[in-house]
Amino acid sequence: MKTIYAFAFLAGCTATAPILTEEPPSTDDGAGSGDRATSTGDDGAGSGSSTGVTADNATTWKIIDHDYQAQVTGYWCAPTATHIALSTRGPAPSQSALASELGTTTNGTDAITQVTGVLNNHLGARYVSVEMPNDPPTRAQHDQLWRDIVLSIDAGHGMVANIVAPPSNHPPGYPDNETIYHYFSVVGYNPTTMQAFISDPADFSGNKEYWLSLDQLATLIPPKGYSTYRCGVGRSHGDIEGRYQMLGGCTGFLGPALTDDTTAPDGVGHYNVFENGSIYWSPSTGAYEVHGAIRDKWRDFGWEAGALGYPVSNETATPDGAGRFSVFEHGSIYWTAQLGAHEVHGMIRDKWKELGWESGSLGYPTSDEYAVTEGRRSDFQHGSLTWNGATNTVTVSQ
């Protein structure tokens, strides 16, 4: 059996480590599990807590699914804690892969900012580093830690804390008479008892996972810090998540997620609402964003259940640079600052296309399609298009 030797350095890891013969297997070196757009609930894709306690049978407390692993070396606490945090979102990279990505050495991992960077590399710009230099922490730091725990866990994201545990302030099982410099994960909370659920890679005396009071956790972190989720209360998955990240994720124009991945009323598609827009997905169309005045107009037409159907493009600038448009399954919505947003569809849209879209002789639409004696009409800057129901033809009026 191979013996693991470990040392307590200020940079940080445990003073002792479990004796293991090999690294636990990892199912995937990526951070995602592919298309999970059909997932709607609290369904972290990890292999489950080693305690068998999950949020499904919780009353007041919540623990998110995760893949617990004990650290393989005495200085891999940060890579292992990062693995556990990433596993709350899907299959996570191995300890060795994360050690390389973090720049971990036999002296440990220098700072929580390195963990935050790796979490964001895998999950998008969702995490920030929170420093707690005051020892003991201020009341504001104590209260902010609790808010961050609740936000992170409610959104299905694990946290990582960098701690300093002197002999007088040890979590369960920590070696006597030693100051432990360490990283562990936070994967749950209990609002009634104000406790955090810790997933601890050190596995001291078999204490893999346990509850810590907020008061004790807050005194363990100074003068270090923690990495916490800060990107809204909602969760996105699969193709919607992919589109969200392509558009800049939490720091993009859509902003934080306000809802979880939600099944559309038709039972076919899914959507997420963000601070400044939405992303809709269906098996036949894929995932596209819609926002602003165009989204408002689409809403007025009944969302995806209305005449236009699901979006099939992101909002796009028109070639003249003056307008914006989004294409849907059964039509389009065009917007300019002067004219606002108007829809165009069917044979009228086909004729407008033949005439050169907004750069043609008619210009931009100035009305939605509406009923007339002959059939249906849409008005444009320089004329109108009328569909005749009797002849099934479209005529141009200028």
Image (cartoon, rainbow, N blue to C red):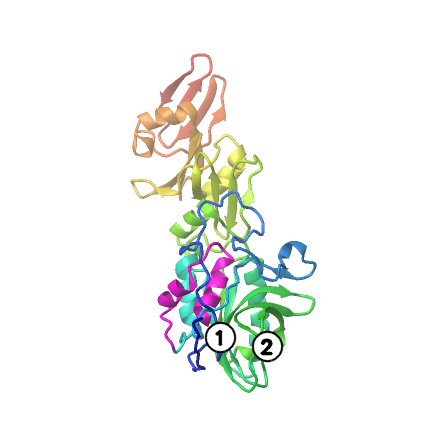
In percent of width and height, residue 31 lies at 43, 55
Q: Is residue 140 visible?
A: no
Residue at the image point whose x is 62% and y is 65% from the top: 189
Magenta range is: 77-106
Q: Nearer the viewer, residue 322 or 383?
A: 322
Q: Which residue is mark 2?
A: 173
Q: Residue furthest front?
A: 1
- Residue depicted at 46% across the width and 65% down the height: 82
SS class of the residue under badge 1? Answer: loop
Does the magenta segment cover residue 270? no
Quadrant location, the C terminus: top left
Is tag 2's residue or tag 1's residue first in the polypeptide sequence? 1
Q: Position of residue 121 (x, y in %)?
A: 39, 60
Q: Position of residue 166 (x, y in %)?
A: 54, 84
Residue 138 falls in image quadrant = bottom right
Q: Which residue is mark 1?
A: 17
Quadrant of the rendering where the N terminus is positioned: bottom left
Whole-Å distance between the Cαs marked 2 and 1?
A: 12 Å
Q: Amino acid at mark 1?
A: Ala
Instruction: Judge by depth and name the residue closer to the eye, 165 or 309.
Output: 165
